[in-house]
Every structure is written in structure tokens, then in C-alpha cells.
Amino acid sequence: MNLVVIEGAGKKDTISKYLGKDYEVIATKGHIRDLPVKSLGVNVNDNFRPQYEIMSDKHNVARELRAKQAKADRVYLATDPDREGEAISWHLCHVLNLDPKDNVRIEFNEISKNAVQEALTKPRPIDLNLVDAQQARRVVDRLVGYKLSPILCKKIQPNLSAGRVQSVALKLIVDREKEITSFKPEEYWTLNAILYKAIEDDKFKTTLTKINGKKPNISNKETMDEILAKLKSGQFKVSSIKKAVSKVHPSAPYTTSSMQQEATNKLNMTLKKVSSCAQELYEGVNIGSEGKVALITYIRTDSVRVSPQAMAMAKDYIAGNFGNDYLPKTPNVYKVKKSAQDAHEAIRPISLDRTPASVKEYLSADNYKLYELIYNKFLASQMAEAVYDTLTVEIDNDIYTFKASGRTLIFDGFTKVYNLSEKKKSKKKADEVEEDEDDEDIKIPRLEEGDVLNLSDLIPAQKFTKPPTRFTEATIVKEMEDKGIGRPATYTPTIVLLLNRQYVEKDGKYLIPTELAFKITDMLDKYFSSIINVQFTADMENKLDEIANDGIEWQAVIQKFYNFFVKTLESADKDSTTFRDPPKETDIVCDKCGGKMLIRTGKFGEFLACGNFPKCRNIKSMAKAVATCPKCGGEVYDRKSKKGDTYYACANRPNQCDFWSWEKPSIDKCPSCGSYMTEKVVYGKLRQKCSNPQCNHTVNVENNKPSGDGV
């Protein structure tokens, strides 16, 4: 028996099916070793040696792996095909006493039978350059997070965190909000002329594009009125007609970033939902009698490269289903960005024969929509260009030039499966997009140069410049990618963290920084502007790439950073400047000493504290209890974990009572075993569930129909 170790449990069944009975597949469910949670875990005096330990929730996994290994003829480490996956395999070597120099590592870009079985024929040693790049990232992020966060807590309020990428992403959002706040709108005017040649049925819209050969700059009504008067007394005459054939090339298949952006824009999904759906499509979904089948290739990539095999697959499919006219003369190849790691192909369907329609009945609504988007995007990227007849007409009236453009589709090409119109419109600046704008389909009558046209109407419009648009989840990802901040695997976790920690809130689809975010950013700008900035973060990403690609010493990279970082830390810590809000006075009297109670901010938010501190240490919670503790009868409050998740804890924790729960405790007792019940809203309905994991009695409170093992 051979043992194959993977990361995600979701793909276990898919891979097992392709390997057969001689292989056993076991999942680590992510990292198995990491830096300790409660200490720095990096020896800065010993060349930044990381102090790894098996994670608290992975001891059972480690024991199971060792037991399986003892019975196995051979062990293959098939963790994800990226730096993180390479590092996990390296950690597994230490846990299982394997030699990283032996051929223990296999990888595949897609979970298909051919890819998995071929990977077994090409085992290799662990790529230590990739491991070192991941170690360097982990160490520098730990140093920044663990050294900066205490200063934030000291100068602003408890329970705050900073991070090398997270804080720069937050700064982008805060700086954009400051731009919006300080923006001063400026007036400008636009002008359309509705013209016709002979009969009004032939009228068409034109736009003023030049005055004396230059772009119009009309800043007030008085100027516009003068222009209107001149135009009405003048003559509109066709000065130029240009006919051409234009070709529109399909865009590249998806990278992680472009998939996230278009899915959030076109499918109205959150980044978290996009990542979740993509993971399921990659790991495999149940396709009827076939069992679990993976539908798309690896989902964390910054490359638009497509393998020759995938190109050949697309060529055969396009020729067979659309005809040879829809094939480009030479295969479409897309340029990979210089900053891209280019470790994997673009995101694409594994098989074009598995059309979205053919698997729709097996997919959730969101998974289907995302698969259809990925499928059509890839298919279109391998198809021929769309071809248009274009017509551009310029009409002069004295020094004023008006323009009308139209185009007619000759050959639909790739647009047969994927339309670019939405994407093209979304790229325009906010103040350029009008609700009724659709000039591409303007019908222009037959005209000749020198034709004199009749004026039907002049339509002036007063407008004002608009401030920059707030970031959405899609546009902040694009901004991070464009500026080289983070990498494909970090975009979603970064934005989710900012939302969970309530540094950022959502107003519809827009991200708005909270008051706390401004304080954090202002403090980091004051003391750490040389580190928490776009350029430094992008440069560090480039250094990590050099470690991975060229094998430069990772400790030297960290040392150079740390020497400077320590000085800024010392300077910030010594400065007595505080960003804390002063305590708020109240009329509430302290029941212990008679002093006035003040509102202060602590780890769990605002609380009441006696103004005579430290002589009187009386404090009271301002939060309202949400339940009664089933263990001691005390008050239960909702709390926030470090990751921003809500949980419920007794007010007497940790000294007098140890009660806490992810679900709100109920006053009701389980009729089956007598344990306390918990409450949670599931799909809009209140559900009660027994807290005893051996019971599982549940009740739908809305219709009072019990269900589960305890019925």
C-alpha cells in the first residue's frame, strides 16, 4: 500500500478514485506545523530561526499519518502545487522523518485521472527554494504582526492587529476615502447635436468633441449659451467620413485576480463566496453515478499561460461545435506579466466536453454560475476575433467639430460565447458613464463629405466632476494586484480579515473604512510609513520571488529588513503620543466609592470604569447580556474572536466559570438528554440544537417540528 498525503479533504474522494486500491489518500487539512500562537516563535538572535511546532488541532492528524506511514510501502506528498503547498510537504517530511532530498513530492495542476497518474511517474525532491520563500514570508509577517500590533493596542485601543499586507490594503482604502472627502467638484458642460440629412426619420446623435481642434473645456452656462447661439446661426457640414474594419481580440483566460474581479462584478458574489465556489469546483463535485469529479484547474495562479494540450483540446472543440471559421489563424497566446510567478496555467475547465449545461443539475446555483463564467472565458480566449464594420463621421460648424460613431457586427467570433461589453463599460471612469450611453449602436444615415445637415436639437448638459469611486471587493483586489501587494492566495483572506475586524464596513458593494481604520492608518503613517507602504510591500514580494526563483538567502533578506524595523519600533514605543479617545464622562455614580463612572474602550469594546482609578477599580460592562449561562447562571455576552468571529461567553470567565460556545445558549433543555439547547438562525429560520454532540436533537422553532436523532 502507498500513502498519498494531500491538503484539502474535499478532493480526497476525487483523487482516491483515480489512484485505485493500492493507494490510500489522507488529508492534512492545511498546515500541520506552524509558528506558536502565543509567542513570537522566531529567534531573532539566531539567524531568525523559526520555532515550529505541530499545531494544537493537528496532533491527531500527525498521529494518524505516522500510523499510516508505518504500514505504507511508499509515501507521496501531493500537497497543493504552490509555495505554501511545497512548505507543507517540507513540514510533513519533518513530522514523518522523511528526507526532503528523496523523491517524495508529486504535484498536479488539475485533479484529472491523467494528471494524477502522470504525477506518480515524476516524483521529485522538495524544492527548498520554494520552501525558503514561504518561510521568509511567514517570518517577516510574524515579525511585523507581533511587533506592530502591541504598539497599536498601546496607542489606540486593545485587541488590534497590524500586518505587512493587511495594513497596506487598509491604507489604500483609507487614503481613497480621504481623497473622496477632500474632493471639490468642478463644473463642466457637454453638448450633443441631433442632426438629419433630409428627413427627420434619419436623425442621429453627435457629440461635440473639438473646439478649434482641441478638446472642449466648457466650464459655465454663459460659455455654453454663447456656443449654442453660434451653432444655431451656423451650418453643419460633413467634413470627414472614415470607414474601416475593426477586429476585437478576446481577452486572456482567468487568473485568480481576474476571476475574483469578474465574478464579484458580473455574478454579484463576495470574494469569500467566489473563493469557496472555486475551491469546490477544483476539488471535485458529485456528478451522478460518476462520483466526485473536478471541473477546473488549480485556482491560485497569476499566469495566463495555457498548456499545448489545453490549446489542442480547445481547437478540436471549437472546430467541432462552431466550425473552422471560429478558429484563429494561429493559436491565441497571452503575455504573462513580468511580476507573475507563472508557476501554473490560467484557470480553465479540465474538459470542454463537460459543458455548464451538462453538469448544471449537479451544481449549486453559485457553483454553476462560476463554472459557466470560467468555461466561457477560456473557450472564448481560444477563439477567433470579432469583426466589425465601423463608421466615424465628423461634422464641422465653424470652429466646432461634432462626431458620431457606429459599428456593425460582421463576424461574431469569440463573442458568440463571451461578450466583452460589460467589461468595456466598467473600465470607463465613473463620470464618463451615462445611463443612456450606448453609442456603438448608433445608426448613421448614408452620408457624403460636404453634405450639409439640418439641426433638429441641441442638448447641453451641466455636469460636475466626481470624486474617485470607493473601492469594492473587486477593485481593491485589482489595485492590490496592479501595485504588486500580496499574491493570488492572499487577496481574499486580506479583505475578509479587514471586514471581520470591522476596520472596514460594506455599504452595498462599496468598502468604507471605519473611524478606527483612520486611527490605525494615521498611527502607522506617523511611525511606520517607510514599511507600511505600497512600494516596500511590493519590493518585499519581489524579494520573495528572488528567493523562490534564484535561491538567494532568505535570512539575509529578513536581516536587512529587521535592522531598520527595530529602530522604528523603538522610536514609536518611546514616543508618548497617543491616538486613544479620552474617556467619556457620564452621570452614572460608582456603587463602590460614589465617584463618577467613565466610558472607556477595552478588548471587548466600551465599558464603564470608575473615574477614581486606581484607588477604585470598579468596572461594569455596557453590553447587554444575550443569554443566561447554563453552567453558573451568570450573564452571557457575545464576543469577538481574534479572527472577528462571534462567540458567546460567560461574564465570569475565566476565573469562576469556563463556559463559552459558538452558538447562543437557550433557556430550554433538551427533552432527550437534558443538556442545554443552543440557538442559531439558519437560512432565515431559528434552529435549536442540543449542545450534547452525542445527542444532536434539533428543533425548527418557527414551525416547531423537531428533527434529528433525538426525536
Image (cartoon, rainbow, N blue to C red):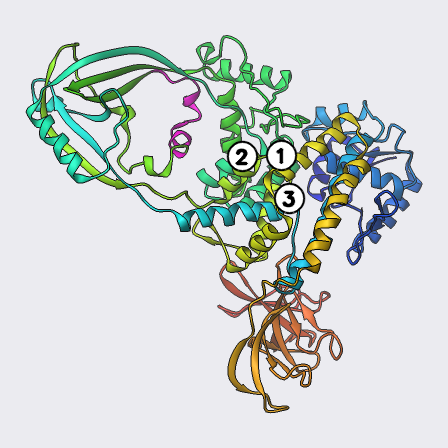
Label 1 and label 2: CA atoms lie apart by 9 Å
Label 1, secondary structure: give it.
loop
Residue 291 shows in this picture: no
Find disc 2 in the rendering and name its residue: 259
Range covered by the magenta-colored residues: 410-426
Label 3, secondary structure: give it.
loop
Marks 1,2: beta carbons within 8 A: yes
Marks 3,1: beta carbons within 8 A: no
Residue 68 image position (x, y, % from top left): 88, 43
Label 2 and label 3: CA atoms lie apart by 32 Å
Looking at the rendered structure, the kind of residue marked 1 is: Ile
Q: Quadrant of residue 607?
A: bottom right
Label 3 and label 1: CA atoms lie apart by 33 Å
Looking at the rendered structure, the kind of residue marked 3 is: Ser
Instruction: Looking at the picture, tell me which residue is in the foreground, 351 or 617.
Output: 617
Q: Earlier in the sequence, mark 1 or mark 2?
A: 2
Q: Residue 299 got which mark? A: 1
Residue 555 image position (x, y, % from top left): 81, 38
